[in-house]
Amino acid sequence: MIYDTDIMKKFFERVVQSLGENEVYTLFLISRRKWFKELPSNYELLDYEVVKESSFEEFYSAVLRLIPQDCAYTSRGGKCIPKSAMAIYVDIIPKDIKKGVVKTIEKFIRILAFENDSSKFKGFCRIMLSNLQKSPSRKPYFLIDVDSKDNSLIEYITEQLRKYSVPVVWISETKGGYHIIARRDGKWMKDFYESIYPVLKNINNVEIKLEKSLLTPIPGSFQGGFPVKGVWNDV
């Protein structure tokens, strides 16, 4: 599921920021029904890793841990989910693990006090993950998801961002189009909201993502069989 560690390292150096106190990154192994029709839902979270250190070695080790053995995951019908129907994503928004733990403890206190349903404790890991994803420590980026391979559209978007001095730190070519990652922690965001956002939000196949969680397939790995590439020369 990895084809180029040099691209992966360059992505890490450009996008993945040094972690502060209580900060972590989350990585996910995901399959999608459009890659494997036997899945019961559009997205299937198969596994995840939490990265606690600011080094490429730790990041890469987490990626390796997410690569499954053949037939490690099956559909409800018992068919093996092939690795060609999987992808490894990173959430580029750092999470505050302390906040996530506090939310999880509060959740289980409510279960103990009011619901009296101990079976819910079996879902501890997923509940903890959900609360962690809802606990950003900061929001250094926004992401523009372009569901098209139209190069002129990418050029138009990046031209608009440059026009208003919005720093683009990375562009990935994905299976379905492109992911443009730009910084959102500066004075340029006023111009972005006033002049760029109103234009881009009305373009077909373009989605501007400003959420607490921003997942992107890791460059240098395969996304549903497609080698995710990095486009960094023009950013």
Image: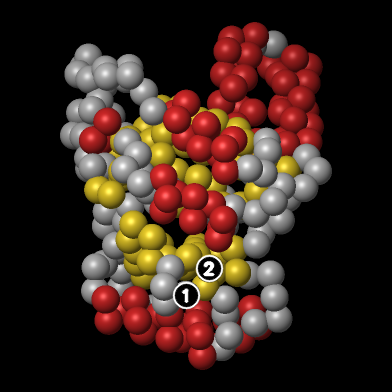
| Residue 69 figure quarter | top left
Q: Earlier in the sequence, mark 1 or mark 2?
A: 2
The type of residue carrying mark 1 is Val
Q: Name the residue under label 1.
A: 235
The amino acid marked with disc number 2 is Val
Q: Is mark 2 on a helix, strand or loop?
A: strand
Picture residue at 18% right of the left edge, 34% below the top: 37
Front-lying residue, 8 or 214: 8
Contact flag, marks 1 and 2 (Cβ < 8 Å): yes
Residue 140 lies, in percent from the top left, at 65, 62
Quarter containing the N terminus:
top left
**Is residue 201 in sight in this rendering?**
no
Q: Distance between the residues labelled 1 and 2?
A: 6 Å
**Which numbered disc covers residue 173?**
none
Q: Residues within 10 Å of mark 2 (few under 14, many from 20)?
A: some
Tell me the tag on residue 169.
2
- Left or right of 142: which side holds 7? left
Please state the total of marks drawn on the protein image: 2
Can you give x and y, in whole percent of width and height, for residue 88 in the image?
A: 41, 39
Question: In the figure, 230 relative to 18: above or below?
Answer: below
Which residue sits at x=71%, y=47%? 19
Q: Residue at x 36, y 84 (%)?
A: 156
Q: Where is residue 53 in the image (x, y as percent from the top left)?
A: 68, 38
Q: Is residue 105 above or below residue 51?
A: above
Q: How is the image coloured?
A: secondary structure
Residue 13 in the image, given as x and y percentages of width and height:
57, 56
Say left or right for 43 vs 37: right
User: From where the camera sits, is residue 216 visible?
Assistant: yes
